[in-house]
Image (cartoon, coloured by chain):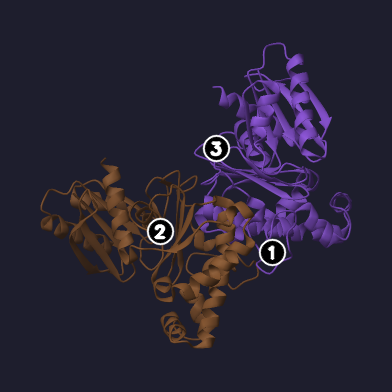
Chain colours: A purple, B brown
Protein backbone atom coordinates (compact mmCIF):
# COMPACT_ATOMS: atom_id res chain seq x y z
CA UNK A 1 0.00 0.00 0.00
CA UNK A 2 1.39 3.44 -0.95
CA UNK A 3 0.09 7.00 -1.11
CA UNK A 4 0.47 9.07 -4.27
CA UNK A 5 -0.12 12.84 -4.31
CA UNK A 6 -0.19 15.23 -7.26
CA UNK A 7 0.26 18.86 -6.20
CA UNK A 8 -1.15 21.50 -8.52
CA UNK A 9 -1.57 25.25 -8.19
CA UNK A 10 -5.20 24.91 -7.13
CA UNK A 11 -5.58 21.51 -5.52
CA UNK A 12 -3.61 18.60 -4.14
CA UNK A 13 -5.01 15.24 -5.27
CA UNK A 14 -4.04 12.15 -3.29
CA UNK A 15 -4.88 8.45 -3.26
CA UNK A 16 -4.13 5.19 -1.49
CA UNK A 17 -2.94 2.84 -4.21
CA UNK A 18 -2.44 -0.93 -4.02
CA UNK A 19 0.31 -2.99 -5.66
CA UNK A 20 -1.96 -3.65 -8.68
CA UNK A 21 -2.43 0.13 -9.10
CA UNK A 22 -6.05 0.02 -7.96
CA UNK A 23 -7.14 3.14 -6.07
CA UNK A 24 -8.58 2.28 -2.64
CA UNK A 25 -9.23 5.78 -1.34
CA UNK A 26 -8.76 9.28 -2.68
CA UNK A 27 -8.95 12.80 -1.32
CA UNK A 28 -8.42 16.31 -2.67
CA UNK A 29 -7.45 19.38 -0.65
CA UNK A 30 -7.05 23.02 -1.61
CA UNK A 31 -3.38 24.02 -2.19
CA UNK A 32 -2.29 26.75 0.26
CA UNK A 33 -0.36 29.64 -1.28
CA UNK A 34 2.73 29.71 0.91
CA UNK A 35 5.41 27.10 1.46
CA UNK A 36 4.95 26.19 5.15
CA UNK A 37 1.13 25.95 5.06
CA UNK A 38 1.47 23.98 1.81
CA UNK A 39 3.86 21.43 3.34
CA UNK A 40 1.62 21.18 6.42
CA UNK A 41 -1.48 20.63 4.27
CA UNK A 42 0.39 18.02 2.23
CA UNK A 43 1.30 16.16 5.44
CA UNK A 44 -2.32 16.44 6.59
CA UNK A 45 -3.55 15.00 3.28
CA UNK A 46 -1.12 12.06 3.58
CA UNK A 47 -2.13 11.38 7.21
CA UNK A 48 -5.82 11.30 6.31
CA UNK A 49 -5.15 8.92 3.42
CA UNK A 50 -3.07 6.68 5.71
CA UNK A 51 -5.99 6.59 8.14
CA UNK A 52 -8.30 5.59 5.29
CA UNK A 53 -6.01 2.79 4.07
CA UNK A 54 -7.08 -0.80 4.84
CA UNK A 55 -3.40 -1.75 5.37
CA UNK A 56 -0.31 0.16 6.59
CA UNK A 57 1.05 2.63 4.03
CA UNK A 58 4.71 1.89 3.31
CA UNK A 59 5.77 4.94 1.30
CA UNK A 60 4.60 8.23 -0.14
CA UNK A 61 5.22 9.63 -3.63
CA UNK A 62 4.62 13.29 -4.46
CA UNK A 63 4.49 14.97 -7.85
CA UNK A 64 5.27 18.68 -7.90
CA UNK A 65 5.05 21.34 -10.65
CA UNK A 66 8.72 21.95 -9.98
CA UNK A 67 12.25 21.66 -11.25
CA UNK A 68 13.94 19.22 -8.89
CA UNK A 69 17.61 18.26 -8.92
CA UNK A 70 19.03 14.76 -8.58
CA UNK A 71 19.51 15.31 -4.83
CA UNK A 72 15.77 15.95 -4.34
CA UNK A 73 16.10 19.71 -3.92
CA UNK A 74 13.15 21.65 -5.32
CA UNK A 75 14.90 24.47 -7.22
CA UNK A 76 11.79 26.36 -8.25
CA UNK A 77 8.12 25.77 -8.96
CA UNK A 78 5.39 27.05 -11.21
CA UNK A 79 2.06 28.08 -9.62
CA UNK A 80 3.10 27.09 -6.08
CA UNK A 81 5.49 28.74 -3.63
CA UNK A 82 8.16 26.04 -3.26
CA UNK A 83 11.62 27.34 -4.07
CA UNK A 84 15.00 26.02 -2.87
CA UNK A 85 13.47 23.60 -0.40
CA UNK A 86 14.09 19.89 0.18
CA UNK A 87 10.37 19.11 0.05
CA UNK A 88 10.90 15.36 0.50
CA UNK A 89 12.87 15.84 3.74
CA UNK A 90 10.31 18.37 5.00
CA UNK A 91 7.50 15.91 4.40
CA UNK A 92 9.41 12.94 5.86
CA UNK A 93 10.00 14.94 9.04
CA UNK A 94 6.26 15.63 9.30
CA UNK A 95 4.90 12.14 8.63
CA UNK A 96 7.65 9.64 9.47
CA UNK A 97 7.36 7.60 6.25
CA UNK A 98 9.66 7.22 3.23
CA UNK A 99 8.90 10.02 0.78
CA UNK A 100 9.97 10.28 -2.87
CA UNK A 101 9.34 13.38 -4.97
CA UNK A 102 9.53 14.04 -8.70
CA UNK A 103 8.46 16.50 -11.35
CA UNK A 104 4.78 16.02 -12.24
CA UNK A 105 5.54 15.64 -15.95
CA UNK A 106 7.98 12.80 -15.27
CA UNK A 107 5.35 11.06 -13.11
CA UNK A 108 2.55 11.42 -15.66
CA UNK A 109 4.91 9.92 -18.26
CA UNK A 110 5.75 7.06 -15.91
CA UNK A 111 2.04 6.36 -15.33
CA UNK A 112 1.11 6.48 -19.03
CA UNK A 113 4.11 4.26 -19.77
CA UNK A 114 3.20 1.56 -17.28
CA UNK A 115 -0.58 1.81 -17.13
CA UNK A 116 -1.83 3.99 -19.98
CA UNK A 117 -1.32 4.89 -23.62
CA UNK A 118 2.42 4.13 -23.57
CA UNK A 119 2.05 0.59 -22.28
CA UNK A 120 4.16 -1.98 -24.09
CA UNK A 121 6.81 0.52 -25.19
CA UNK A 122 10.20 1.19 -23.57
CA UNK A 123 10.66 4.62 -25.16
CA UNK A 124 7.82 7.06 -24.48
CA UNK A 125 7.74 10.83 -24.79
CA UNK A 126 4.82 12.51 -23.07
CA UNK A 127 3.68 16.11 -23.38
CA UNK A 128 0.93 17.66 -21.25
CA UNK A 129 -0.77 20.59 -22.90
CA UNK A 130 -2.39 22.82 -20.27
CA UNK A 131 -1.78 26.44 -19.32
CA UNK A 132 1.86 25.57 -19.95
CA UNK A 133 3.46 22.50 -21.52
CA UNK A 134 5.01 19.85 -19.32
CA UNK A 135 6.87 16.78 -20.37
CA UNK A 136 8.32 13.49 -19.40
CA UNK A 137 10.61 11.01 -21.14
CA UNK A 138 10.89 7.25 -20.64
CA UNK A 139 13.98 5.63 -22.20
CA UNK A 140 14.90 1.97 -21.71
CA UNK A 141 11.79 1.78 -19.55
CA UNK A 142 13.03 4.35 -17.03
CA UNK A 143 12.49 8.08 -16.56
CA UNK A 144 15.17 10.12 -18.35
CA UNK A 145 15.91 13.10 -16.11
CA UNK A 146 19.20 14.30 -17.60
CA UNK A 147 22.61 14.73 -16.01
CA UNK A 148 21.54 16.45 -12.80
CA UNK A 149 17.81 15.72 -12.79
CA UNK A 150 16.45 18.89 -14.37
CA UNK A 151 15.99 17.68 -17.95
CA UNK A 152 12.83 16.63 -19.80
CA UNK A 153 11.58 20.23 -19.71
CA UNK A 154 10.11 19.58 -23.13
CA UNK A 155 7.90 22.66 -23.18
CA UNK A 156 10.98 24.86 -23.19
CA UNK A 157 12.57 23.53 -26.35
CA UNK A 158 12.68 26.31 -28.96
CA UNK A 159 10.50 25.92 -32.05
CA UNK A 160 10.66 29.51 -33.32
CA UNK A 161 13.80 31.38 -32.31
CA UNK A 162 12.19 34.81 -32.76
CA UNK A 163 8.88 33.85 -31.11
CA UNK A 164 7.23 35.58 -28.12
CA UNK A 165 8.74 35.54 -24.61
CA UNK A 166 7.90 32.69 -22.24
CA UNK A 167 6.61 33.12 -18.70
CA UNK A 168 7.31 32.26 -15.06
CA UNK A 169 10.88 31.02 -14.66
CA UNK A 170 11.65 30.57 -18.35
CA UNK A 171 13.75 33.33 -19.99
CA UNK A 172 13.34 31.79 -23.47
CA UNK A 173 11.61 33.11 -26.58
CA UNK A 174 9.57 30.99 -28.97
CA UNK A 175 9.78 27.79 -26.96
CA UNK A 176 7.06 25.20 -27.49
CA UNK A 177 5.09 26.50 -24.51
CA UNK A 178 4.86 29.97 -26.06
CA UNK A 179 3.50 28.56 -29.34
CA UNK A 180 1.28 25.56 -28.49
CA UNK A 181 0.08 25.80 -24.86
CA UNK A 182 -3.28 26.97 -23.55
CA UNK A 183 -1.61 30.34 -22.99
CA UNK A 184 -0.56 30.46 -26.66
CA UNK A 185 -4.04 29.44 -27.82
CA UNK A 186 -5.61 32.16 -25.67
CA UNK A 187 -3.17 34.79 -27.01
CA UNK A 188 -3.75 33.75 -30.61
CA UNK A 189 -7.53 33.32 -30.27
CA UNK A 190 -8.25 36.36 -28.11
CA UNK A 191 -10.22 34.38 -25.51
CA UNK A 192 -9.53 31.77 -22.80
CA UNK A 193 -8.22 28.47 -24.23
CA UNK A 194 -11.27 26.56 -22.94
CA UNK A 195 -13.51 28.95 -24.87
CA UNK A 196 -11.48 28.58 -28.08
CA UNK A 197 -11.66 24.79 -27.69
CA UNK A 198 -15.43 24.93 -27.11
CA UNK A 199 -15.95 27.19 -30.15
CA UNK A 200 -13.76 24.97 -32.32
CA UNK A 201 -15.64 21.88 -31.22
CA UNK A 202 -18.86 23.69 -32.23
CA UNK A 203 -17.39 24.30 -35.70
CA UNK A 204 -16.21 27.92 -35.49
CA UNK A 205 -13.68 28.26 -38.36
CA UNK A 206 -11.53 30.90 -36.63
CA UNK A 207 -11.22 28.80 -33.48
CA UNK A 208 -10.41 25.69 -35.55
CA UNK A 209 -7.64 27.65 -37.29
CA UNK A 210 -6.24 28.78 -33.93
CA UNK A 211 -6.02 25.18 -32.73
CA UNK A 212 -4.51 24.19 -36.07
CA UNK A 213 -1.72 26.75 -35.68
CA UNK A 214 -1.00 25.54 -32.15
CA UNK A 215 -1.12 21.94 -33.40
CA UNK A 216 1.37 22.70 -36.15
CA UNK A 217 3.86 24.09 -33.63
CA UNK A 218 3.21 21.07 -31.45
CA UNK A 219 4.15 18.98 -34.51
CA UNK A 220 7.38 20.98 -34.95
CA UNK A 221 8.22 20.10 -31.35
CA UNK A 222 7.39 16.43 -31.94
CA UNK A 223 9.70 16.37 -34.99
CA UNK A 224 12.58 17.79 -32.91
CA UNK A 225 11.93 15.35 -30.07
CA UNK A 226 11.69 12.45 -32.53
CA UNK A 227 15.07 13.32 -34.05
CA UNK A 228 16.71 13.72 -30.64
CA UNK A 229 15.02 10.97 -28.58
CA UNK A 230 13.51 8.64 -31.21
CA UNK A 231 10.61 7.43 -29.00
CA UNK A 232 8.39 4.50 -29.96
CA UNK A 233 5.28 6.54 -29.12
CA UNK A 234 4.24 10.10 -28.27
CA UNK A 235 1.52 10.43 -25.62
CA UNK A 236 -0.25 13.79 -25.45
CA UNK A 237 -2.26 14.73 -22.37
CA UNK A 238 -3.27 17.73 -20.28
CA UNK A 239 -6.47 19.72 -19.96
CA UNK A 240 -6.29 21.60 -23.28
CA UNK A 241 -5.47 18.39 -25.14
CA UNK A 242 -8.37 16.58 -23.43
CA UNK A 243 -10.81 19.13 -24.82
CA UNK A 244 -9.28 19.73 -28.24
CA UNK A 245 -8.44 16.13 -29.16
CA UNK A 246 -7.94 15.64 -32.90
CA UNK A 247 -8.44 19.35 -33.61
CA UNK A 248 -4.99 19.75 -32.06
CA UNK A 249 -3.51 16.28 -32.66
CA UNK A 250 -4.39 16.03 -36.36
CA UNK A 251 -2.34 19.07 -37.44
CA UNK A 252 0.42 18.10 -34.98
CA UNK A 253 0.72 14.62 -36.48
CA UNK A 254 0.83 15.93 -40.06
CA UNK A 255 3.49 18.54 -39.26
CA UNK A 256 5.57 16.00 -37.34
CA UNK A 257 5.46 13.41 -40.14
CA UNK A 258 6.46 16.01 -42.76
CA UNK A 259 9.51 17.18 -40.78
CA UNK A 260 11.17 14.31 -38.88
CA UNK A 261 13.91 12.21 -40.51
CA UNK A 262 12.18 9.25 -42.22
CA UNK A 263 13.07 6.58 -39.59
CA UNK A 264 11.96 8.95 -36.84
CA UNK A 265 8.69 10.01 -38.49
CA UNK A 266 6.67 6.88 -37.78
CA UNK A 267 5.97 6.96 -34.03
CA UNK A 268 2.24 6.99 -33.21
CA UNK A 269 1.00 10.25 -31.64
CA UNK A 270 -1.81 9.22 -29.28
CA UNK A 271 -3.94 10.86 -26.58
CA UNK A 272 -3.17 10.06 -22.95
CA UNK A 273 -5.64 7.60 -21.43
CA UNK A 274 -5.26 8.17 -17.68
CA UNK A 275 -6.58 11.74 -17.69
CA UNK A 276 -5.87 13.92 -14.68
CA UNK A 277 -5.30 10.78 -12.58
CA UNK A 278 -1.95 10.13 -14.29
CA UNK A 279 -0.07 12.33 -11.83
CA UNK A 280 -1.44 10.55 -8.74
CA UNK A 281 -0.80 7.10 -10.22
CA UNK A 282 2.72 8.12 -11.27
CA UNK A 283 3.41 9.38 -7.74
CA UNK A 284 2.18 6.04 -6.36
CA UNK A 285 4.46 4.15 -8.79
CA UNK A 286 7.39 6.31 -7.64
CA UNK A 287 6.60 5.46 -3.99
CA UNK A 288 6.28 1.75 -4.75
CA UNK A 289 9.60 1.80 -6.66
CA UNK A 290 11.30 3.55 -3.74
CA UNK A 291 10.50 0.71 -1.32
CA UNK A 292 10.67 -2.17 -3.83
CA UNK B 1 44.22 -4.75 -29.82
CA UNK B 2 41.30 -3.44 -31.90
CA UNK B 3 40.83 -1.61 -35.17
CA UNK B 4 38.74 1.55 -35.39
CA UNK B 5 37.64 3.05 -38.70
CA UNK B 6 35.89 6.34 -39.40
CA UNK B 7 34.23 6.41 -42.83
CA UNK B 8 33.67 9.82 -44.39
CA UNK B 9 32.54 10.92 -47.82
CA UNK B 10 36.12 11.48 -49.02
CA UNK B 11 38.34 9.17 -46.98
CA UNK B 12 38.25 6.24 -44.62
CA UNK B 13 40.57 6.74 -41.64
CA UNK B 14 41.58 3.65 -39.66
CA UNK B 15 43.89 2.81 -36.79
CA UNK B 16 45.13 -0.06 -34.65
CA UNK B 17 44.37 0.98 -31.08
CA UNK B 18 45.61 -0.61 -27.85
CA UNK B 19 43.67 -1.04 -24.61
CA UNK B 20 45.08 2.23 -23.27
CA UNK B 21 43.77 4.03 -26.42
CA UNK B 22 47.22 4.58 -27.83
CA UNK B 23 47.35 4.43 -31.63
CA UNK B 24 49.91 1.87 -32.88
CA UNK B 25 49.33 2.18 -36.62
CA UNK B 26 47.07 4.24 -38.83
CA UNK B 27 46.10 4.28 -42.46
CA UNK B 28 43.77 6.33 -44.67
CA UNK B 29 42.18 5.20 -47.93
CA UNK B 30 40.01 7.00 -50.44
CA UNK B 31 36.28 6.23 -50.03
CA UNK B 32 34.83 4.57 -53.17
CA UNK B 33 31.53 6.00 -54.35
CA UNK B 34 29.42 2.82 -54.57
CA UNK B 35 28.39 0.36 -51.90
CA UNK B 36 30.18 -2.84 -52.93
CA UNK B 37 33.55 -1.22 -53.72
CA UNK B 38 33.21 0.76 -50.49
CA UNK B 39 32.66 -2.37 -48.39
CA UNK B 40 35.54 -4.10 -50.20
CA UNK B 41 37.85 -1.13 -49.59
CA UNK B 42 36.79 -1.04 -45.94
CA UNK B 43 37.68 -4.73 -45.60
CA UNK B 44 40.99 -4.07 -47.34
CA UNK B 45 41.78 -1.21 -44.95
CA UNK B 46 41.02 -3.44 -41.96
CA UNK B 47 43.18 -6.30 -43.32
CA UNK B 48 46.13 -3.98 -43.85
CA UNK B 49 45.78 -2.59 -40.33
CA UNK B 50 45.57 -6.13 -38.91
CA UNK B 51 48.79 -6.96 -40.75
CA UNK B 52 50.44 -3.89 -39.23
CA UNK B 53 49.32 -4.74 -35.70
CA UNK B 54 51.97 -6.09 -33.28
CA UNK B 55 49.35 -8.41 -31.72
CA UNK B 56 46.22 -10.14 -33.06
CA UNK B 57 43.29 -7.76 -33.59
CA UNK B 58 40.25 -8.95 -31.62
CA UNK B 59 37.49 -6.74 -33.00
CA UNK B 60 36.69 -3.94 -35.43
CA UNK B 61 34.59 -0.84 -34.85
CA UNK B 62 33.32 1.30 -37.71
CA UNK B 63 31.78 4.76 -37.61
CA UNK B 64 29.51 5.66 -40.52
CA UNK B 65 27.83 8.93 -41.58
CA UNK B 66 24.58 6.98 -41.40
CA UNK B 67 21.32 6.45 -39.60
CA UNK B 68 21.56 2.95 -38.15
CA UNK B 69 18.79 1.11 -36.32
CA UNK B 70 19.15 -0.91 -33.12
CA UNK B 71 19.55 -4.10 -35.18
CA UNK B 72 22.62 -2.73 -36.96
CA UNK B 73 20.85 -2.02 -40.25
CA UNK B 74 22.18 1.06 -42.06
CA UNK B 75 18.95 2.81 -43.08
CA UNK B 76 20.54 5.63 -45.07
CA UNK B 77 23.76 7.59 -45.25
CA UNK B 78 24.95 11.07 -46.06
CA UNK B 79 27.80 11.47 -48.59
CA UNK B 80 28.31 7.72 -49.07
CA UNK B 81 26.20 5.16 -50.92
CA UNK B 82 25.16 2.84 -48.08
CA UNK B 83 21.41 2.47 -47.87
CA UNK B 84 19.41 -0.41 -46.37
CA UNK B 85 22.42 -2.61 -45.88
CA UNK B 86 23.64 -4.57 -42.85
CA UNK B 87 27.14 -3.12 -43.14
CA UNK B 88 28.39 -4.91 -40.02
CA UNK B 89 27.40 -8.34 -41.38
CA UNK B 90 28.86 -7.52 -44.81
CA UNK B 91 32.18 -6.60 -43.22
CA UNK B 92 32.21 -9.60 -40.86
CA UNK B 93 31.70 -11.89 -43.85
CA UNK B 94 34.70 -10.27 -45.55
CA UNK B 95 37.19 -10.24 -42.68
CA UNK B 96 36.09 -12.94 -40.20
CA UNK B 97 36.37 -10.74 -37.10
CA UNK B 98 33.71 -9.32 -34.74
CA UNK B 99 32.49 -6.00 -36.20
CA UNK B 100 30.45 -3.30 -34.45
CA UNK B 101 29.11 -0.26 -36.29
CA UNK B 102 27.61 3.01 -35.07
CA UNK B 103 26.76 6.50 -36.22
CA UNK B 104 29.90 8.68 -36.41
CA UNK B 105 28.36 11.35 -34.18
CA UNK B 106 27.69 8.82 -31.43
CA UNK B 107 31.28 7.58 -31.66
CA UNK B 108 32.82 11.05 -31.58
CA UNK B 109 30.73 11.75 -28.46
CA UNK B 110 31.88 8.48 -26.91
CA UNK B 111 35.54 9.36 -27.58
CA UNK B 112 35.26 12.92 -26.25
CA UNK B 113 33.43 11.55 -23.20
CA UNK B 114 36.05 8.96 -22.32
CA UNK B 115 39.24 10.53 -23.64
CA UNK B 116 38.59 14.18 -24.53
CA UNK B 117 36.78 17.32 -23.45
CA UNK B 118 33.90 15.43 -21.81
CA UNK B 119 36.08 13.35 -19.52
CA UNK B 120 34.84 13.15 -15.93
CA UNK B 121 31.21 13.78 -16.82
CA UNK B 122 28.45 11.17 -17.22
CA UNK B 123 26.16 13.41 -19.26
CA UNK B 124 27.75 14.85 -22.39
CA UNK B 125 26.12 16.36 -25.46
CA UNK B 126 28.40 16.68 -28.46
CA UNK B 127 27.77 18.58 -31.68
CA UNK B 128 30.06 18.44 -34.72
CA UNK B 129 29.81 21.51 -36.91
CA UNK B 130 30.97 20.68 -40.43
CA UNK B 131 29.17 20.77 -43.77
CA UNK B 132 26.21 19.47 -41.75
CA UNK B 133 25.71 19.14 -38.01
CA UNK B 134 26.10 15.76 -36.35
CA UNK B 135 25.53 14.89 -32.77
CA UNK B 136 25.96 12.39 -30.02
CA UNK B 137 24.57 12.10 -26.50
CA UNK B 138 26.08 10.35 -23.48
CA UNK B 139 23.69 9.84 -20.56
CA UNK B 140 24.58 7.84 -17.44
CA UNK B 141 27.93 7.27 -19.11
CA UNK B 142 26.47 5.44 -22.10
CA UNK B 143 25.47 6.49 -25.64
CA UNK B 144 21.79 7.50 -25.80
CA UNK B 145 20.50 6.25 -29.14
CA UNK B 146 16.73 6.48 -28.57
CA UNK B 147 14.04 3.82 -28.73
CA UNK B 148 15.12 2.12 -31.94
CA UNK B 149 18.64 3.48 -32.35
CA UNK B 150 18.01 6.40 -34.68
CA UNK B 151 17.95 9.24 -32.14
CA UNK B 152 20.64 11.81 -31.27
CA UNK B 153 20.20 13.42 -34.70
CA UNK B 154 20.82 16.73 -32.97
CA UNK B 155 21.37 18.71 -36.17
CA UNK B 156 17.78 18.11 -37.17
CA UNK B 157 16.13 19.67 -34.18
CA UNK B 158 14.12 22.72 -35.29
CA UNK B 159 15.32 26.13 -34.15
CA UNK B 160 13.31 28.30 -36.55
CA UNK B 161 10.06 26.68 -37.74
CA UNK B 162 9.85 28.85 -40.87
CA UNK B 163 13.56 28.57 -41.72
CA UNK B 164 15.06 27.31 -44.99
CA UNK B 165 14.75 23.68 -46.17
CA UNK B 166 17.34 21.13 -45.08
CA UNK B 167 19.24 18.81 -47.43
CA UNK B 168 20.01 15.15 -48.17
CA UNK B 169 17.56 12.90 -46.35
CA UNK B 170 16.08 15.54 -44.05
CA UNK B 171 12.66 16.93 -45.05
CA UNK B 172 12.72 19.54 -42.28
CA UNK B 173 12.78 23.35 -42.43
CA UNK B 174 14.78 25.55 -40.09
CA UNK B 175 16.53 22.75 -38.25
CA UNK B 176 19.84 23.53 -36.56
CA UNK B 177 21.81 22.25 -39.57
CA UNK B 178 20.08 24.79 -41.85
CA UNK B 179 20.98 27.68 -39.53
CA UNK B 180 24.38 26.95 -37.99
CA UNK B 181 26.31 24.46 -40.18
CA UNK B 182 29.05 25.16 -42.69
CA UNK B 183 26.33 25.06 -45.35
CA UNK B 184 24.38 27.75 -43.47
CA UNK B 185 27.50 29.90 -43.02
CA UNK B 186 28.27 29.61 -46.75
CA UNK B 187 24.69 30.54 -47.69
CA UNK B 188 24.64 33.50 -45.31
CA UNK B 189 28.16 34.69 -46.14
CA UNK B 190 28.09 34.13 -49.90
CA UNK B 191 31.35 32.14 -49.96
CA UNK B 192 32.60 28.73 -48.80
CA UNK B 193 32.50 28.32 -45.01
CA UNK B 194 36.30 27.91 -44.81
CA UNK B 195 36.68 31.26 -46.56
CA UNK B 196 34.22 33.00 -44.23
CA UNK B 197 36.09 31.55 -41.25
CA UNK B 198 39.43 32.71 -42.68
CA UNK B 199 38.07 36.21 -43.33
CA UNK B 200 36.54 36.42 -39.86
CA UNK B 201 39.80 35.29 -38.27
CA UNK B 202 41.51 38.11 -40.21
CA UNK B 203 39.04 40.60 -38.73
CA UNK B 204 36.51 41.08 -41.57
CA UNK B 205 33.42 42.52 -39.85
CA UNK B 206 30.91 40.99 -42.27
CA UNK B 207 32.39 37.53 -41.85
CA UNK B 208 32.48 37.94 -38.06
CA UNK B 209 28.77 38.87 -38.16
CA UNK B 210 28.01 35.79 -40.28
CA UNK B 211 29.68 33.52 -37.71
CA UNK B 212 27.90 35.40 -34.94
CA UNK B 213 24.49 34.69 -36.51
CA UNK B 214 25.35 31.00 -36.91
CA UNK B 215 26.66 30.95 -33.33
CA UNK B 216 23.44 32.47 -32.04
CA UNK B 217 21.39 29.72 -33.68
CA UNK B 218 23.82 27.19 -32.29
CA UNK B 219 23.07 28.71 -28.88
CA UNK B 220 19.32 28.33 -29.49
CA UNK B 221 19.95 24.66 -30.15
CA UNK B 222 22.07 24.33 -27.02
CA UNK B 223 19.27 25.89 -24.94
CA UNK B 224 16.77 23.36 -26.31
CA UNK B 225 19.15 20.47 -25.72
CA UNK B 226 19.93 21.71 -22.21
CA UNK B 227 16.23 21.84 -21.31
CA UNK B 228 15.58 18.38 -22.78
CA UNK B 229 18.77 16.48 -21.87
CA UNK B 230 20.36 18.60 -19.10
CA UNK B 231 23.97 17.59 -19.88
CA UNK B 232 26.86 18.42 -17.56
CA UNK B 233 28.90 19.67 -20.51
CA UNK B 234 28.52 20.55 -24.20
CA UNK B 235 31.44 19.58 -26.44
CA UNK B 236 31.57 21.27 -29.84
CA UNK B 237 33.74 19.81 -32.60
CA UNK B 238 33.89 19.46 -36.37
CA UNK B 239 35.90 21.17 -39.08
CA UNK B 240 34.04 24.51 -39.09
CA UNK B 241 34.19 24.70 -35.30
CA UNK B 242 37.91 23.90 -35.34
CA UNK B 243 38.53 26.93 -37.54
CA UNK B 244 36.05 29.37 -36.06
CA UNK B 245 36.60 28.65 -32.37
CA UNK B 246 35.39 31.43 -30.09
CA UNK B 247 34.04 33.43 -33.05
CA UNK B 248 31.30 30.77 -33.15
CA UNK B 249 31.34 29.55 -29.54
CA UNK B 250 31.20 32.96 -27.87
CA UNK B 251 27.84 34.00 -29.39
CA UNK B 252 26.55 30.42 -28.94
CA UNK B 253 27.37 30.45 -25.24
CA UNK B 254 25.74 33.84 -24.66
CA UNK B 255 22.54 32.86 -26.51
CA UNK B 256 22.37 29.53 -24.67
CA UNK B 257 22.79 31.13 -21.23
CA UNK B 258 20.11 33.74 -21.97
CA UNK B 259 17.50 31.14 -23.02
CA UNK B 260 17.83 27.91 -21.01
CA UNK B 261 15.92 27.44 -17.75
CA UNK B 262 18.21 28.67 -14.93
CA UNK B 263 19.30 25.22 -13.64
CA UNK B 264 19.99 24.12 -17.21
CA UNK B 265 21.91 27.27 -18.23
CA UNK B 266 25.17 26.52 -16.46
CA UNK B 267 26.78 23.67 -18.44
CA UNK B 268 30.20 24.59 -19.86
CA UNK B 269 30.32 24.84 -23.67
CA UNK B 270 33.81 23.71 -24.65
CA UNK B 271 35.69 22.85 -27.86
CA UNK B 272 36.37 19.20 -28.63
CA UNK B 273 39.96 18.19 -27.94
CA UNK B 274 40.41 15.03 -30.04
CA UNK B 275 39.99 16.76 -33.40
CA UNK B 276 39.30 14.61 -36.42
CA UNK B 277 40.72 11.58 -34.60
CA UNK B 278 37.64 11.39 -32.35
CA UNK B 279 35.76 9.22 -34.82
CA UNK B 280 38.54 6.62 -35.11
CA UNK B 281 39.06 6.51 -31.33
CA UNK B 282 35.30 6.21 -30.75
CA UNK B 283 35.14 3.34 -33.24
CA UNK B 284 38.00 1.63 -31.38
CA UNK B 285 36.18 2.10 -28.05
CA UNK B 286 33.06 0.56 -29.62
CA UNK B 287 35.09 -2.44 -30.79
CA UNK B 288 36.74 -2.86 -27.38
CA UNK B 289 33.35 -2.66 -25.63
CA UNK B 290 31.95 -5.29 -28.01
CA UNK B 291 34.50 -7.89 -26.93
CA UNK B 292 34.91 -6.77 -23.30
The span from disc 1 to disc 3 (Cα, nearest Å) is 33 Å
Q: Quadrant of residue A69?
A: top right
Report the front residue among A211 and B242: B242
Binning the other alpha carbons within 10 Å of mark 2 as few (below 14), some (14 to 19) or many (20 upward) gives many
Q: Which mark is residue A173?
A: 1
Circle 1 or circle 3, nearest the eye: 1
Give the mark nearer the N terminus: 1 vs 3. Answer: 3
Q: Hey, which residue is sitting farthest top in the picture?
A: A54
Please give the residue where the numbered disc 3 appears in the rendered image: A121
Q: Position of residue A4 (x, y in %)?
A: 69, 27
Q: Position of residue B33 (x, y in %)?
A: 31, 70
Image height check: is B125 above or below B163?
Answer: above
SS state under label 2? helix
SS state under label 1? loop
Number of numbered discs visible in the structure rendering = 3
Circle 3 or circle 2, nearest the eye: 2
Residue drawn at (75%, 61%) of the image = A213
- Location of the N terminus of chain A by quadrant is top right
Q: Position of residue A142 (x, y in %)?
A: 53, 36
Residue B73 makes an appearance in the image: yes
Residue B218 is left or right of residue A42, and the answer is left
Q: Quadrant of residue A289?
A: top right
- Location of the C terminus of chain A by quadrant is top right
Q: Quadrant of residue A223?
A: bottom right
Q: Are marks 3 and 2 on the same chain?
A: no
Please give the residue where the numbered disc 2 appears in the rendered image: B105
Q: Which mark is residue A39?
A: none
**CB within 8 Å, label 1 to label 3:** no
Residue A50 is left or right of residue B285, and the answer is right
Amino acid sequence: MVVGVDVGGTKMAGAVVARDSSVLASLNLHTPKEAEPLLDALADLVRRLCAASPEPVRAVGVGLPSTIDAGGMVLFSTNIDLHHVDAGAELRARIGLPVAIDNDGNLAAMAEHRLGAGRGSDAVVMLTIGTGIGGGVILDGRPMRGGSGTGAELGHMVVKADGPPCQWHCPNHGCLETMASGTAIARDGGAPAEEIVARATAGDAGAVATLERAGQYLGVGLASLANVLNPDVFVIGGGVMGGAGELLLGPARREYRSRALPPNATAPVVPATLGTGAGVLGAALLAADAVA
